[in-house]
Amino acid sequence: MTRSALWPLRALALCLGLGVGLSACTLTYLPPLREVRESTPRLELGPASSLRAVQEAGGTRLELVLELSRVPEPDWLAVQWFNPRNEEVAATSLWVVPRETERRNALPADVPVEPGLWRVVVSYQGRLVRQLSLEL
């Protein structure tokens, strides 16, 4: 065969080789699709949730008020109290259920309340729900 007669066969072989080689790369023929994940339901707190200072005869008492807008399932709510020096001074767990609308928790009476920025961190099922703070 002449050189010009082999040209179509070489072109065909080159196209076949490139087609087979490129078809092994999945990104060359289809755009990648994100994996769609179903989100897990989360506990939601309403805008009335707050950290309050309550004046009593014995001094100031701190109280956490949580407005429960949505509780997906019964479980423990973790509450951690931090003083103005950013030390964890108290921690407790509260059992919450779906139909519940409000929970209150007070700083234990044996913890001295001092001036400064107090914080409370609220977690549900290992996830941070909200951090509330109060300047005394």
Image (cartoon, rainbow, N blue to C red):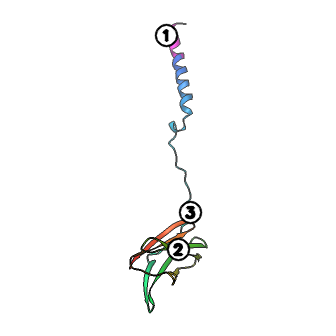
Q: CA distance from mark 1 to mark 3?
A: 66 Å
Residues shaded magenta: 1-9
**Residue on which the image places disc 3:** 40
Q: Alpha carbon of mark 1 to alpha carbon of mark 2: how far? A: 83 Å
Crowding near the residue tagged with mark 2, few <14, some 14–19, many ≥20 C-alpha atoms within 10 Å: some
Please determine whether, in this image, residue 11 is positioned above or below residue 79.
above
- Of circles 3 and 2, the one toward us is 2
Name the secondary structure under disc 2: strand
Write down the residue under mark 2: 79
Q: Nearer the viewer, residue 60 or 75?
A: 60
Q: Nearer the viewer, mark 1 or mark 3?
A: 3
**Up-down: is 39 above or below 12?**
below
The residue under the point 49% across, 10% down is 4
Where residue 95 sits, quadrant-wise, is: bottom right
Q: Quadrant of residue 21?
A: top right
x%, y% of residue 47? 43, 75
Name the quarter where the N terminus is drawn: top right
Vertical placement of residue 7 versus 18, above or below: above
Residue 45: x and y in percent read 49, 73
